[in-house]
């Protein structure tokens, strides 16, 4: 047993270390919202902050629990991830995505196109000039639509409902915390979100245990409906019920006093193999269509052969009680109704090719882009095609062979989509000085990127790592 | 088997404590942790399966080598990609795991008791005596010594001994992995088996007639895991080997009786297990008693179901088989098989009365009162106004009331070491070298362990790692912001 003096000494010993501990913990915690992640080729991960990248791709990394900056040689590094910056709307006229032969793609305002070069004005690197022969395609971008809703930011405006279905177990409520709704028991939450007739609805979903949820679309009724006894429920109008569970997804038009109709059931491996997903629903009321995208991949577009079932403009999220579920980053916007197909990549083209929004095609020599019009030359005819009528332009090319990457390159991915490959001359907080045979020298804003691959030429690192998100979302 | 030395001396402890304070206030050179040749500091560490693993409270993980620990400069870690060794301050360190720790620290003499202490330490040893002030016991790490009774939470007695039959995994060696349908389904990594597809892994653990099989199970998504207990079929799942088969899904565990050539029959299913719905990692313990035709399952130390096989014991083998049925990733670690004393139910000493001691008898009776002394094979016990004398062999567990409950203030270098052979012990780290780890334990004073016997050490004992219950960094957000 210790005597009093020993205890005193021990207390001093403890305090000596506890006080700095508390201080450091606060620093780590406050640093979390902006923390970045360094991923290694062996699967290791180190959170912290990128200080710089040198021309030989050595990385200087900072952590609050290491006094000195840590220098890593590039060989065993894989990727650096940054907290995603919110995508800023590209509302410029002539906004487009330029696709390069090496699969890079950059978004900006198309300024100029002639027989030798294409000039893009970007928000992240100013004017970027591409030799025409490195460009595979140009895809005009539809104007960004105003967001109708973004949230959640609290429970205000939402209607909590009790789930009464016996199979769902004991009912609970959705709770709001830190930008997200959580439910650990069966629960319903609804709101009139003023869904437009042609709508894009996005949100992030995360779950533990079995995923089992139902999302009511275009509902005017804010309380959950027990589908097994729907005809005895109060008048709820019609809606679509998007049902998702750990294995499949299906859509049901729901109307009172009408038989339940299960539209095609689609397996969704993501729901059993992961515990989070980005969900996107695109609804087109005039076309009686509702499409589900999971992690940016189209799962299914359901077409209702009867009238559109939805009678309202609200949504209801119902957790059906097996495990815990989290919903965040809900964004609703008007949609242009265009279902982008994956960019086709013709193996070779003897002429330039323009695909128009109405389905027509124009082949010939694309001479210039000026005053908002593409000027095509076709045998004996010249044709001006307005920018806004074009769906995609492919440039003449002889081969579809992949472009070899050099070892000194890195590939940086823009937070709003797309990527660019370059050799780093220096990466500092103020700017990323780069060089590329595709666009010469350019200086990028570092916050434009949400991740970089340090060895894009290695197959292993070309696989996308799971995104690392900050804890403040 | 090496036995680490214990230096027990109160006056010696005091001198060392003062020395430790002086050392910590000043600076001293790095203490060598692991002997490695200069040539080993290179990229080949990336391909070594047995490199050590450093985990941080913020979810960072780094493979590499522990080079030294210094209370002034921090923990020096060698990583294959870092141009220089990295000196980490201790405040953000969660764990270091040593996959090569395969040298059991438990002595050849059979321990017969499990001691649990107020500070969270627990280990196997042998009871010697108990009076109103002190407990005297024999430890595997250093002979006899005494500790204040107030520091002891419980003593559990194992008449048949408590030496583990198996503890691991440390590699795929000895396990049957690679059977169809997916030969690559299971891999070994950092002290764990990880399944990323459907497939089986099995081993004959030579389970005795009454056994307990424990492991940690973590998952990244929905899963279906079959666990065959007392099976002889180790190379793939089939119905040709009689066994008990537990079907584990998030939230439920059910048991089937597999009879070779006949088929299966369901013995029952647990109630929904909330821990499996809200967490991504649990500790599972399966117990079977052939003589009693009895099985039970505990999740995180809590009993979730018991089964009595009225048709008689069906298990014909002495092995286990894990069968991951789907593509979701699951991780199995800290597998431990040991003989079971057949006493059902939870062993967690959380229900002790606040002031009275509680005696659990072998016949499953419980008595509350005051333990006076325990020596020469007899316990003197006061219950109400009656003084009882109970032979030790009739006692299965003593849970002490009135144990110290004051929160423990821990220093950054106070670590908890988990050792091969079972058990954890915490101490303020003084020295770490290739042979020995030494420090000051709150209960026993100065202790020294064989460093090769340590499977993992935990830092910042009052903190939990951001992704402690997850497999991938993708999940950090959920644990951090969930209420």
Image: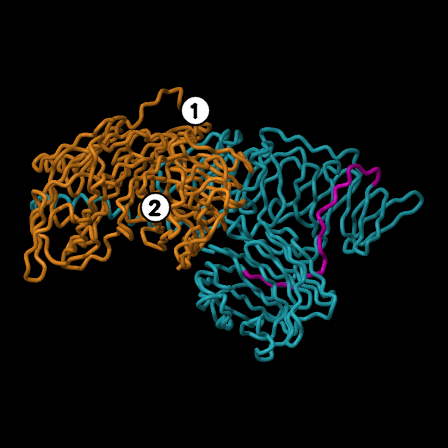
Chain colours: A cyan, B orange
The correct choice, above or below, for B147 with respect to A264 in the image is above
Q: In the image, residue A276 lies at what x, y percent?
A: 52, 52
Residue B157 in view here? yes
The residue singled out by tag 1 in the image is B42
- Secondary structure type for disc 1: loop
Q: How crowded is mark 2: few (under 14 residues within 10 Å), some or many (20 or more)?
A: many
Residue B62 is drawn in which quadrant? top left
Per the picture, the main secondary structure of the magenta-coloured stretch is loop
Residue bounds of the magenta highlight? A330-351
Q: In the image, residue A141 lies at what x, y percent?
A: 70, 53
Q: In which quarter of the image is the N terminus of chain A?
A: top left
Q: Does the magenta stretch include residue A37?
A: no
The residue singled out by tag 2 in the image is B288
Relative depth, front residue between A123 and B463: B463
Q: In the image, residue B334 lies at what x, y percent?
A: 36, 40
Residue B430 is drawn in which quadrant? top left
């Amino acid at each position: 047993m210790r005597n009093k003096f020993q205890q005193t000494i021990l207390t001093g010993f403890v305090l000596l270390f506890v006080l700095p501990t508390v201080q450091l913990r606060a620093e780590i915690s406050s640093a979390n919202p902006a923390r970045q992640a360094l991923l290694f080729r062996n699967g290791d991960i180190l959170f912290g902050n990128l200080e710089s990248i040198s021309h030989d791709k050595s990385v200087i990394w900072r952590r609050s629990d290491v006094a000195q900056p840590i220098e890593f040689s590039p060989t065993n590094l894989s990727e650096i991830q940054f907290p995603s910056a919110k995508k800023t709307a590209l509302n410029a006229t002539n906004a487009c995505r330029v696709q390069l032969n090496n699969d890079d793609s950059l978004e900006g305002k198309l300024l100029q196109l002639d027989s030798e070069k294409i000039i893009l004005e970007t928000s992240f690197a100013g004017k970027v000039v591409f030799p025409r022969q490195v460009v595979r395609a140009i895809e005009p971008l539809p104007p960004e639509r105003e967001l109708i809703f973004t949230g959640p930011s609290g429970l205000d405006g939402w209607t909590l409902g009790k789930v009464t279905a016996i199979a769902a177990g004991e009912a609970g409520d959705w709770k709001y915390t830190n930008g997200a709704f959580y439910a650990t028991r069966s629960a319903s939450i609804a709101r009139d979100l003023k869904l437009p007739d042609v709508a894009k609805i996005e949100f992030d979903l995360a779950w533990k245990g079995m995923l089992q949820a139902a999302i009511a679309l275009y509902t005017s009724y804010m309380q959950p409906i027990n589908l097994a006894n729907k005809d005895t429920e109060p008048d709820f109008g019609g809606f679509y019920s998007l049902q998702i569970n750990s294995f499949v997804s299906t859509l049901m038009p729901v109307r009172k006093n009408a038989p339940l109709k299960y539209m095609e059931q689609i397996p969704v491996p993501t729901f059993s193999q992961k515990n989070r997903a980005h969900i996107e629903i695109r609804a087109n009321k005039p076309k009686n269509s509702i499409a589900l995208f999971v992690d940016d991949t189209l799962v299914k577009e359901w077409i209702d052969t009867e009238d559109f079932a939805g009678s309202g403009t609200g949504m209801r999220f119902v957790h059906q009680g097996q495990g815990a579920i989290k919903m965040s980053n809900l964004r609703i916007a008007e949609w242009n109704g265009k279902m982008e197909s994956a960019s086709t990549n013709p193996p070779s083209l003897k002429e330039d090719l323009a695909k128009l929004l109405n389905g027509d095609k124009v082949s010939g020599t694309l001479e210039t882009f000026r005053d908002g019009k593409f000027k095509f030359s076709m045998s004996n005819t010249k044709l001006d095609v307005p920018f806004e009528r074009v769906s995609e332009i492919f440039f003449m090319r002889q081969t579809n062979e992949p472009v070899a990457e050099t070892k000194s390159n890195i590939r940086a991915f823009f937070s709003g989509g797309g990527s660019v490959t370059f050799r780093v001359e220096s990466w500092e907080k103020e700017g990323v000085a780069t060089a590329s045979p595709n666009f010469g020298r350019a200086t990028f804003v570092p916050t434009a990127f949400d991740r970089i691959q340090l060895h894009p030429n290695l197959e292993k690192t070309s696989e996308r790592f799971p995104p690392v998100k900050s804890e403040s979302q | 088997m090496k036995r680490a030395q214990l230096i027990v001396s109160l006056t010696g402890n005091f001198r060392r404590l003062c020395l430790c304070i002086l050392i910590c206030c000043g600076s001293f050179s790095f203490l060598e942790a692991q002997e490695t040749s200069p040539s080993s500091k290179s990229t080949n560490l990336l391909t070594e399966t047995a490199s050590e693993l450093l985990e941080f409270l913020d979810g960072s993980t780094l493979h590499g080598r522990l080079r030294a620990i210094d209370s002034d400069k921090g923990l020096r870690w060698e990583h294959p990609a870092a141009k220089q060794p990295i000196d980490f301050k201790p405040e953000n360190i969660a764990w270091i795991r040593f996959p090569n720790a395969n040298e059991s620290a438990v002595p050849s003499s059979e321990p017969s008791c499990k001691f649990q202490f107020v500070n969270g330490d627990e280990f196997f040893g042998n009871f010697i005596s108990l009076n109103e002030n002190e407990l005297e016991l024999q430890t595997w790490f250093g002979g006899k010594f005494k500790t204040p009774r107030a520091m002891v939470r419980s003593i559990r007695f194992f008449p048949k001994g408590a030496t583990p039959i198996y503890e691991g995994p440390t590699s795929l060696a000895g396990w049957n992995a690679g059977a169809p349908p997916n030969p690559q389904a299971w891999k070994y990594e950092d002290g764990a088996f990880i399944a990323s597809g459907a497939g089986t892994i099995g081993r004959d653990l030579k389970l005795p007639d009454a056994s307990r099989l424990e492991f940690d199970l973590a998952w990244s998504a929905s899963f279906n895991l079959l666990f065959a207990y007392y099976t002889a079929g180790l190379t793939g799942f089939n119905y040709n080997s009689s066994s008990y088969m537990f079907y584990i899904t998030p939230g439920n565990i059910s048991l089937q009786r597999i009879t070779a050539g006949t088929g299966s029959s369901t013995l029952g299913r647990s109630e929904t297990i909330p821990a499996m719905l809200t967490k991504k990692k649990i500790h599972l313990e399966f117990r079977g008693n052939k003589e009693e035709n009895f099985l039970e399952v505990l999740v995180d130390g809590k009993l979730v179901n018991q089964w009595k096989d009225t048709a008689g014991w069906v298990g014909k083998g002495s092995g286990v088989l894990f069968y991951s049925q789907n593509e979701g990733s699951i991780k199995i670690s800290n597998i431990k098989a040991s003989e079971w004393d057949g006493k059902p139910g939870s062993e967690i000493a959380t229900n002790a009365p606040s002031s009275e001691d509680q005696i659990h008898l072998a016949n499953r009776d419980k008595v509350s009162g005051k333990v006076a002394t325990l020596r020469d094979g007899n316990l003197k016990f006061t219950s109400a106004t009656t003084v009882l004398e109970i032979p030790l062999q009739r006692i299965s567990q003593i849970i002490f009331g009135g144990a110290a409950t004051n929160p423990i203030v821990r220093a950054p270098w106070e670590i908890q070491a988990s050792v091969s052979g079972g058990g954890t012990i915490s101490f303020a780290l003084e020295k770490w070298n290739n042979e020995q780890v030494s420090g000051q334990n709150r209960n026993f004073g100065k202790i020294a362990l064989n460093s090769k016997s340590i499977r993992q050490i935990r830092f910042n004992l009052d903190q939990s790692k951001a992704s402690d219950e997850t497999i991938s960094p993708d999940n950090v957000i959920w644990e951090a912001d969930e209420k």
